[in-house]
Amino acid sequence: MAMIKLLSMDKRTFYLNPDLIYRIEETPDTIITLTNGRTLVVENSAASIVELIIEYRKKTYQDILGLTSEQEKRG
């Protein structure tokens, strides 16, 4: 899947393409600004969103390179 799973303020799950994220702020609500200027307010913390993006990118590159988790650990 080419998206990360997030939770809206009204407790609905939705999926977002992380390539569209311009920045993430905590004010204390978490606000995601997209590359088109649109903003989204979500329940997820900024740190958890960053972790989701890291995991998404790891999976993407593993798939592209044809690596398994064990192969990645061995280098």
Image (cartoon, grey):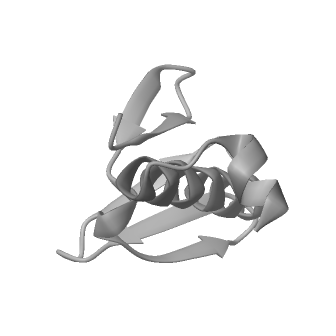
* Residue 4 vertical position relative to residue 23 in the rendered view, above or below: above
Residue drawn at (56%, 45%) of the image:
42
Question: In the image, is 70 to the left or to the right of 53?
Answer: right
Q: Please name whichever residue, 21 or 71, is drawn nearer the observer in this view of the structure.
A: 71
* Residue 25 vertical position relative to residue 49 in the rendered view, above or below: below
Q: Please name whichever residue, 12 or 62, is drawn nearer the observer in this view of the structure.
A: 62
* Residue 4 vertical position relative to residue 21 in the rendered view, above or below: above
Residue drawn at (25%, 66%) of the image:
38
Q: Please name whichever residue, 27 or 47, is drawn nearer the observer in this view of the structure.
A: 47
Q: Please name whichever residue, 3 or 61, is drawn nearer the observer in this view of the structure.
A: 61
* Residue that lies at the very extreme toward the right in this rendered image: 74
Q: How many marks?
A: 0
Which quadrant: the C terminus?
A: bottom right
Q: Position of residue 52 (x, y in %)?
A: 63, 50
Q: Position of residue 18 (x, y in %)?
A: 40, 59
Residue drawn at (82%, 57%) of the image:
73
* Residue 46 vertical position relative to residue 10 in the rendered view, above or below: below
* Residue that lies at the very extreme toward the top in this rendered image: 12
Judge whether residue 25 can be spotted in this image.
yes
Judge whether residue 8 can be spotted in this image.
no
Question: In the image, is 30 to the left or to the right of 38?
Answer: right
Question: Where on the picture, by quarter, is residue 70?
Answer: top right
Q: Position of residue 44 (x, y in %)?
A: 68, 45
Which quadrant: the N terminus?
A: top left
Residue drawn at (53%, 51%) of the image:
56
